[in-house]
Image (cartoon, rainbow, N blue to C red):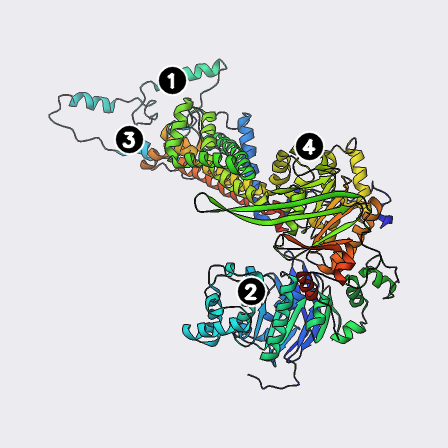
């Protein structure tokens, strides 16, 4: 044996836990695809937060409810005016003569410009002049509103793709931060309750029982009422304060199980402090539970944000999120404008699925027992 | 069914190869082309250490291997009474297994369903395989329970598994296995989880039933001494290959294979105490030549320095009874002993005797109810936690299960440096890691172990890591709680040798807790026998084993398997 020990500097460093986990993750094709998707979402989020993309989402670049490009421009509105035959004249109408005059009147240059409501714009000529002047003096030209956009437009003519990207920023940040915060709270409480047991456990259980006995929405509303502010931070706090109960229960059970394990006794025997035993020894062994909880909560919180926005406790006016988009989509759907709903739903479904698959694979890769 | 041909072997295994898939591409062959026969009316023992493929072979015979991860090579043959088992349909095989071939497992607690009465579970077998109705089955179940020696079977038939002791549960398992009068009984380590006195009863029972029912038994075990008591034929396996096969006399008296010889010698025996226990490597390198060694003296003269004195130690557990009452259970009561410096006190007893509780209470992992433990004249049991912190490093413990006692998320280096960090041993991390490297060398582990995780090591190596962790604090008293019980025989010898070397070098005092009387005899100067929380006998180990004064000690000693007896 002595020959192998001669030189302590020659070390074959065993791959660390994370290196091993990464190796196992890489072998999992589904996990890698899921990870790429999540990474793409996060990249988009960063870029939009930095103002590189989708910064101009509020520009009204299309006509109201401009349909997606692959469907083609909505011809109905314009066609209606041309095709629609004038209603038959009412012989009793005292204004019949004037109306007849008006119908004949339109100038040749004015006839083409028809606005959203199918009525010729009486100021079209003046507007065109103003634009021409602006162009001459070098000012920004207000582009003509497009009749189609790649994935359509909303009521105000916002590009749906840009809006979805901007909405992702809010939704993902809310989902991720609130989920991490809730899991952090749940883990701390669960660790204390499970590890110490007895009175401490009783206290946290009592706290937990109270929280879970209040109907969920009522609890959210009361927290929202107490915080008295609208905004992304408020939503995050509301979700974190109400969402810690799930992780708490699971982490508490894990700690109860692990504190009786021999490795924790061994740590006790060498004189490790409670804090050390709880977070240096036990936590890495139960961290997969917390991870899974984060993934479940992220999914749930993105959905909760929708509910909150719907109830009016969500994002303030002027901030867009997938939740507010879905909220708008309800009315649009009646008019047959499905694209905003599809865009927000698809983005959410893809992210949520990818995130779930990824954390599931991550859990497997990190679990020391599944080696 | 084939005709009964007395010359034909009951079971014939030819060139059995079993491989397990480790991932999508690779698979590991765990059984590498073994062939053996089981004659009628005989007991064949399959002996080997963990990883030898003995259990996998028996599961292959039963058809219980997981189909999605394991595969049996196409040219393997398992022939039972002239029928090739591997060519049977799953349904035919299911009928055969259970009726003609049955199996008992190591852990009776997990093999019985806790929510059904034992009577129901036995009757289920009878109804399925023998086509009995409920009333007949119940009657037969009572007969079976009586046959396997369950007292008061008419009442016990309605008991739940949890209401029975481990030995009784194993008897119920045996009753289920013999319910259909099988021709072959496979017993996979049936006594490993049981106490030594119960082990003897179960072995005797299996042997009696074999003769009575004219069965054959395939007895799988790691314990050669046990084999000597029960088997007619012995097959020694290692790493998926058969090293040697023969009658029990051949194997015990003139083993040809070096591995078999090593296995026979590395178990400590009751009559000798060599200076060092031989290990497998000794035999493999010397081609079987036994090195003559002087005997190691053990025992106390009476003038040794006492390092730890325990007086009237007691520990009670309470369970709630009714609304306000609580019921006291005395796990340990009135235990007193003195531990001499540099000597070993062995603590033996069956499960539930309180021997582990003594160790844990001394470590203050349990709070003692009564008594004192004087360490340098100070009672460590009544100290405050803060005061005890300084004593903690001087009394250390090595647990039974090296798989559970090391944090799987720490590297070996972190495991070794943590106690030094906590107790401010060593000035900085580089000094600490230097000490850790030294200790790794001391316990016989390669330096590269420093950066590895516990799961990359075998059981014996992990136990060395646990020992090294204790040594970082330079303790004076080391509590070894069943520290070698979970290890293979050959590894056990290595760890025992290591413990003895360390005792010589550092003058350590051991409290060696074990259910294994042979190991305790080998390593201990003094032996304390415990039963039901009380000390039965405390004497120098040679005296105790030669002249036990208490009836309980005699029972224990008689139950030790002694290998082949003439």
Identify the element where label 4 is drawn. Answer: helix
Q: Residue B350 falls in which quadrant of the image?
A: bottom right
Give percent across and percent down for residue B132: 44, 76
Of the numbered discs in the image, which one, if any, rests on residue A81? Answer: 3
The chain letter for the residue carrying disc 3 is A
Measured along the vertical axis of the image, is residue A189 above or below residue B194? Answer: above
Residue behind mark 1: A127
Q: Is residue B305 visible?
A: yes
Identify the element where label 3 is drawn. Answer: helix
Q: CA distance from mark 2 to mark 4?
A: 46 Å
Of the two numbered discs 2 and 4 in the rendering, the one whose residue sits closer to the viewer? 4
Residue behind mark 4: B387
Mark 3 surroundings within 10 Å by alpha-carbon count, few (fewer than 14), some (14 through 19), many (20 or more): some
The chain letter for the residue carrying disc 1 is A
The chain letter for the residue carrying disc 4 is B
Considering depth in this image, is A263 or B407 the residue closer to the camera?
A: A263
Q: Horizontally, is B141 left or right of B239 in the view?
A: left
């Amino acid at each position: 044996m002595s020959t192998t020990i001669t030189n302590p500097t020659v070390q074959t460093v065993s791959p660390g836990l994370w290196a091993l986990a990464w190796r196992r993750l890489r072998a999992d094709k589904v996990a890698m695809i899921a990870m790429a998707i999540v990474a793409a979402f996060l990249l988009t989020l960063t870029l939009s937060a930095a103002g590189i993309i989708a910064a101009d989402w509020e520009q009204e670049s299309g006509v109201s409810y401009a349909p997606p490009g692959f469907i083609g421009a909505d011809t109905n509105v314009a066609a209606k005016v041309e095709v629609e035959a004038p209603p038959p004249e009412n012989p009793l109408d005292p204004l019949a003569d004037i109306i007849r005059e008006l119908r004949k009147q339109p100038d040749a240059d004015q006839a083409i410009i028809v606005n959203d409501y199918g009525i010729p714009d009486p100021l079209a000529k003046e507007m065109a002049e103003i634009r021409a002047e602006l162009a001459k003096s070098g000012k920004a030209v207000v582009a003509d509103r497009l009749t189609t956009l790649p994935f359509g437009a909303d009521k105000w003519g916002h590009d749906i793709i840009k809006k979805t990207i901007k909405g992702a920023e809010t939704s993902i940040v809310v989902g991720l931060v609130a989920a991490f915060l809730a899991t952090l709270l749940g883990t701390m409480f669960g660790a204390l309750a499970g590890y110490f047991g007895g009175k401490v456990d009783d206290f946290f259980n009592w706290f937990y029982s109270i929280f879970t006995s209040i109907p969920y929405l009522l609890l959210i509303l009361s927290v929202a009422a107490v915080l008295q502010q609208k905004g992304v931070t408020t939503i995050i706090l509301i979700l974190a304060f109400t969402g810690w109960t799930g992780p708490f229960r699971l982490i508490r059970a894990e700690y109860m199980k692990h504190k009786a394990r021999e490795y924790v006794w061994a740590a006790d025997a060498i004189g490790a402090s409670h804090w050390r035993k709880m977070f240096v020894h036990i936590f890495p062994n139960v961290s997969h539970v917390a991870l899974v909880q984060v993934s479940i909560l992220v999914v749930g919180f993105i959905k909760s944000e929708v509910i909150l926005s719907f109830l009016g406790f969500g994002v303030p006016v002027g901030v867009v999120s997938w939740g507010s988009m879905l909220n708008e989509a309800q009315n649009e759907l009646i008019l047959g404008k499905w694209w905003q709903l599809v865009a927000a739903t698809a983005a959410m479904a893809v992210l949520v699925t990818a995130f779930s698959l990824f954390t599931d694979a991550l859990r497997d890769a990190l679990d020391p027992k599944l080696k | 069914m084939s005709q009964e041909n007395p010359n034909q072997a009951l079971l014939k295994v030819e060139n059995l190869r079993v491989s397990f898939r480790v991932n999508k591409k690779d698979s590991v062959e765990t059984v590498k082309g073994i062939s053996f026969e089981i004659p009628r009316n005989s007991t064949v023992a399959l002996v080997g250490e963990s990883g030898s493929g003995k259990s996998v072979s028996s599961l292959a015979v039963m058809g219980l291997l997981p189909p999605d991860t394991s595969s049996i090579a196409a040219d393997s043959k398992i022939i039972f009474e002239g029928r090739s088992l591997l060519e049977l349909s799953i349904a035919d095989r299911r009928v055969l297994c259970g009726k003609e071939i049955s199996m008992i497992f190591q852990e009776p607690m997990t093999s019985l369903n806790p929510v059904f009465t034992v009577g129901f579970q036995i009757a289920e077998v009878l109804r399925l395989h023998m086509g009995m109705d409920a009333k007949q089955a119940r009657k037969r179940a009572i007969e079976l329970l009586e046959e396997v020696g369950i007292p008061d079977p008419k009442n016990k038939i309605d008991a739940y598994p949890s209401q029975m002791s481990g030995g009784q549960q194993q008897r119920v398992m045996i009753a289920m296995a013999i319910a259909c009068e099988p021709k072959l009984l496979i017993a996979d380590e049936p006594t490993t989880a049981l106490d030594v006195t119960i082990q003897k009863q179960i072995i005797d029972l299996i042997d009696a039933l074999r003769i009575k029912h004219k069965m054959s038994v395939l007895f799988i075990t790691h314990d050669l001494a046990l084999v000597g008591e029960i088997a007619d034929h012995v097959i020694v396996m290692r790493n998926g290959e058969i090293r040697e096969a023969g009658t029990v006399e051949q194997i015990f008296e003139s083993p040809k294979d070096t591995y078999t010889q090593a296995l026979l010698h590395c178990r400590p025996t009751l009559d000798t105490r060599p200076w060092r226990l031989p290990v497998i490597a000794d035999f493999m390198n010397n081609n079987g030549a036994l090195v003559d060694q002087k005997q190691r003296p053990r025992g106390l003269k009476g003038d040794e320095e006492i390092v730890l004195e325990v007086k009237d130690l007691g520990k009670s557990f309470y369970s709630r009874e009714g609304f306000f009452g609580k019921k006291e259970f005395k796990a340990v009561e009135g235990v007193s002993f003195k531990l001499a410096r540099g000597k070993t006190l062995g603590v033996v007893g069956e499960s539930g005797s309180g021997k582990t509780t003594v160790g844990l209470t001394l470590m203050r992992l349990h709070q003692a109810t009564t008594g004192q433990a004087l360490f340098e004249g100070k009672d460590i049991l009544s100290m405050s936690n803060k005061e005890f912190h300084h004593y903690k490093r001087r009394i250390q413990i090595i647990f039974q299960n090296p798989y559970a006692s090391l944090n799987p998320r720490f590297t070996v280096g972190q495991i070794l440096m943590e106690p030094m960090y906590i107790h401010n041993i060593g000035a900085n991390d580089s000094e600490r890691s230097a000490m850790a490297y030294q200790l790794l060398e001391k316990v016989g582990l390669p330096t590269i172990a420093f950066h590895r995780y516990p799961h990359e090591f075998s059981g014996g190596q992990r136990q060395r890591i646990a020992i090294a962790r204790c040594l970082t604090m330079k303790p004076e008293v080391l509590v070894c709680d069943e520290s070698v019980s979970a290890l293979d025989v050959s590894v056990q010898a290595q760890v025992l040798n290591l413990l003895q070397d360390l005792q010589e070098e550092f003058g350590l005092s051991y409290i060696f807790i074990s259910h294994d009387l042979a190991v305790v005899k080998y390593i201990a100067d003094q032996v304390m026998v415990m039963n039901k929380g009380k000390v039965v006998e405390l004497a120098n180990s040679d005296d105790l084993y030669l002249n036990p004064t208490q009836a309980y000690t005699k029972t224990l000693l008689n139950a030790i398997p002694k290998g082949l007896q003439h």
